[in-house]
Amino acid sequence: MSVKKYILFIFTLYISFISFTQRNVKDSSISTPWVSIHYNGMFTYGDLADRYGYLNHLGFSAGYKLKSNWVFTSDAAFIFGNQVNLTGVFDHLLDSQGTMTDVNGDIGMVYANPRGMHINFCIGKIIPVFSPNNNSGLYFNFGVGYLAHHLKIESQDQVIPSIELDYRKGYDRLTTGVNINQFIGYSFMSNSGFYNFYFGAYFQQGFTKNRRTIFFDQPDIPVSQDLMIDGQIGFRFGWLIPVYKRQPKSYYFN
């Protein structure tokens, strides 16, 4: 399913919930499934900043909010960007003119950008202050999960033998490990309308290792297997999709 179709599906699902369910958000704290789509804008630091700059996270969360305002969720996100701080990765493949050629002898165009993903399990709490109801307020959570990132290498429709198929693994810097994350912000659940969202500061720390045994651009240098600290700091904005239980209908007879 494409990203556009996925978002359309979530939007349609949400409209269905608005149309066919009732809720009592204004009068009391409720328990409800918690579904959201979120975007993170992240600045890197630590070992991750040696490789990449600003990163985008586009993800999905699902879980459950209790009447006590404790929130339990799992989330997954696709990581992408276009700022690469690595230098000289393909220098040894260039000719005297500073170009790389494909199998037809034409100048090859190579694109390398950061890509990755993470999966987390989180626990959080909503504190109903500065809020229109007991289901909104300051929101913070903590999570732990799995992080993976690499350098995605593409040559479009050209075939450049030195970076095709398994050869790409010698350049992609595949890195994986455990990560922890923290969020502090504000969650808003509307009394009766369409607008349900949360936003705030997001922090992530990855404890990762290189998963390749050789870098082709540095064949004589052993690949470090030391633990790396992949830090990210930025913001998160999420569109919250609460799912409310249908209320029973009342019938009156004369």
Image (tube, helix red, strand yellow):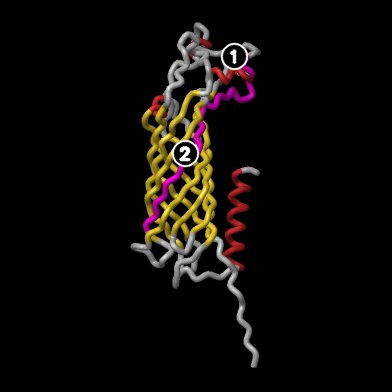
Query: Which residue is depicted at the point 53% across and 39% down?
Result: 78
Mark identifier at residue 162? 1
Which is nearer the eye, 190 or 111? Answer: 190
Mark 2 burial class by Cα count in 10 Å: few <14, some 14-19, many 20+: many
Which is nearer the eye, 175 or 83? Answer: 175
For residue 89: magenta? no
Q: Is residue 179 visible?
A: yes
Q: Is 96 displayed left or right of 249 in the figure? A: left
Query: Which residue is depicted at the point 52% across and 15% down?
Result: 214
Amino acid carrying label 1: it is: Ser
Query: Between disc 1 and disc 2, whose residue precedes?
Result: 2
Residue 238 coordinates in the image, percent (x, y): 47, 51
Q: Which residues are magenta?
A: 138-161
Which is nearer the eye, 52 or 24? Answer: 24
Residue 147 coordinates in the image, percent (x, y): 50, 35
Per the image, label 2 sits on a secondary structure element best described as strand
Per the image, label 1 sits on a secondary structure element best described as helix
- Farthest residue toward the top? 96
Mark identifier at residue 56? 2
For residue 141: magenta? yes
Q: Is residue 2 above or below residue 252?
A: above
Q: Is residue 92 above or below residue 129?
A: above
Which quadrant would the C terminus be assigned to in this image?
A: bottom right
Residue 86 coordinates in the image, percent (x, y): 43, 22
Residue at mark 1 to residue at mark 2: CA–CA distance: 29 Å
Q: Is residue 79 above or below residue 26?
A: above
Which is nearer the eye, 51 or 154? Answer: 51
Amino acid carrying label 2: it is: Asn
Prevailing secondary structure of the magenta residues = strand
Q: Is residue 113 visible?
A: no
Q: Is residue 22 above or below residue 201?
A: below
